[in-house]
Image: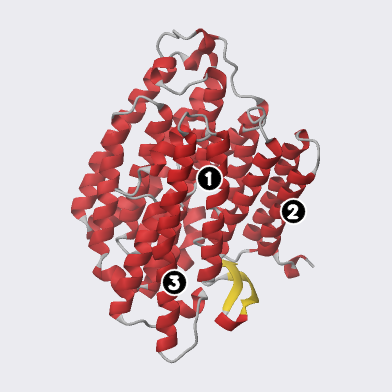
Amino acid sequence: MIQQLPLLSLLFLTLPLGAALAWLLPRPEWAKRIALGTALIDLCISLLIVFRFDPSQSGFQMVEQANWIPTLNIQYLVGVDGISLLFLPLTVLLFIGVILSSWNTVTTLPRLYYSLLLVLETATLGIFCSLDTMLFFLFWELSLIPIYFLISLWGSGPNRRYAAMKYIMVMVAGGVPLLFGFLLLAFGHAQSGGNLVFDLPTLLATAMPAKLQIAVFLLLLLGFAVKVPLFPLHTWLPLAAMEGPAAVTAMLVGIKLGAYGLIRFAIPLAPEAAHSLHWMLAALGAFSVMYGAVAALAQTNLRRMLAYASLSHVGLVVMGLASLDLQGLQGSVLQLLTFTLASGGGFLLISALQHRVGSTDILSLGGAARSMPMLASFFLLFGLAGMGMPGTSGFPAELLILVSAFGHHAGAALAALFAMVLGTAYFLSMYRRAFFGPAHNPVIQDAMDLRPRELAVTLIFACLILAGGFFPSVILDVIQPAGEAWVMRIK
């Protein structure tokens, strides 16, 4: 029966099977169809998970458990709550967009390309569902290898191999404090009279000494800050955005796994330390908001501009988490969901623009709205959502974060407001120069607008952004029970 199906395991298992088929079947043109079909099956499974989820409960649901390494008490333990639930369908939807965006652009080693995409999707979904720290770390590290090859083999820049190597070296270095933090938690539980424990529910129910919490919090914060990214650990992002495939960059920018790690592990596992060091989170967030906005203002390339804009936006998320209250958490989660649609969708449109024009630099653009009105319109909508324009899901997200921040860190909130003004300036100025004015490039005058498959995905993204803006309570009600439990854990 449907209620007995291990839906989360099915969500994971279909993707490696699809990756194997895409790699093993002899005809390269089959690979993209297999990848798309597998992702669509996964989208149906993720929607079934959402349908089965009971939003009135605060705990983890659809939990699946099995021994993995019994001698160390490490388990295959997965589940979802109101905080992680909506990331599943949006992540799958973004990967579908990446597959469709690569439909006619990837001609070199297509079987390997689409296989790596499905492996990366497996790791990403595993991160959102893992309730065992070692299982989480496994998926966390698994996500690095596909991205390395995707950037180095299919990147569009001359320094793509350097960008790929820098990415993986920085991420592997960030994984070291992450692993140490999880091991400290396990040994801390053992020293308090129990066994080694790696499963999240047990760790959340265990009180840890304050000194141990400080060490764990700092280690996890450092490990996750690399992936968020936070200044000054952000240098890999603009480089990867410029050198890697624009479609693949949509995943790096749109899915903020580091910020999710802060929500799921760093703050609730070390609540006393989070209270003691909330000022550090607020300062890191505020500085990233300001730095990203100023840096984006100085860019002349759409890809680099969006990369720095994402740094500014995720800094706002960290600032919201620093408030340690329900409004800040709800705003942060809603902002992360908006990232997946707005930032991810923006990079998918940039991928389409680069495929048509051959460049995303302002000097090569201008007048694009005449030949590509639909692309220009949707890009404007995604940019306005990133700016927090009323009517988009970015508005209630930023409003919740700012209201929460003003109650706890007024200085950081003022800095964020100033950065939002700069955000309006850099986006609208860049947009005007790229899409309006005279079309000096003859390639732009004859460029094709969005194809039906591109339009379909973009339209879904746009509808979800507008639905989140006009009916945010639908999302906030899903987050609230788990969010209240999260806040009570910290209080």
| Nearest to the observer: residue 114 or residue 386 | 114
Height in image: 318 above or below 269?
above
Tell me the crowding category of disc 2: few under 14, some 14 to 19, or many 20 or more residues within 10 angstroms, Cα based.
Answer: some
Answer few, some or many: residues within 10 Å of disc 1's Cα (few below 14, many 20 plus, some between 14 and 19). many
SS for tag 2? Answer: helix
Q: Is residue 257 visible?
A: yes
Quarter containing the C terminus: bottom left
Amino acid, disc 2: Leu
* Residue at the image position 60 percent from the left and 24 percent from the top: 450
Instruction: Tell me residue 262's x, y (percent).
Output: 40, 61
Q: In the rendered image, which residue does mark 1 sit on?
A: 148
Q: Quadrant of residue 173?
A: bottom left
Residue at label 2?
Answer: 17
Residue type for callout 1: Tyr
Residue 19 left/right relative to 428? right
Quadrant of the image occupied by residue 25: top right
Residue annotated with mark 3: 182
Q: How many marks?
A: 3
Three-letter code, disc 3: Phe
Judged left or right of residue 410, residue 114 is: right
Give x and y (percent) for residue 161: 49, 37
Disc 3 residue crowd, few under 14, some 14–19, many 20+, Cα 10 Å: many
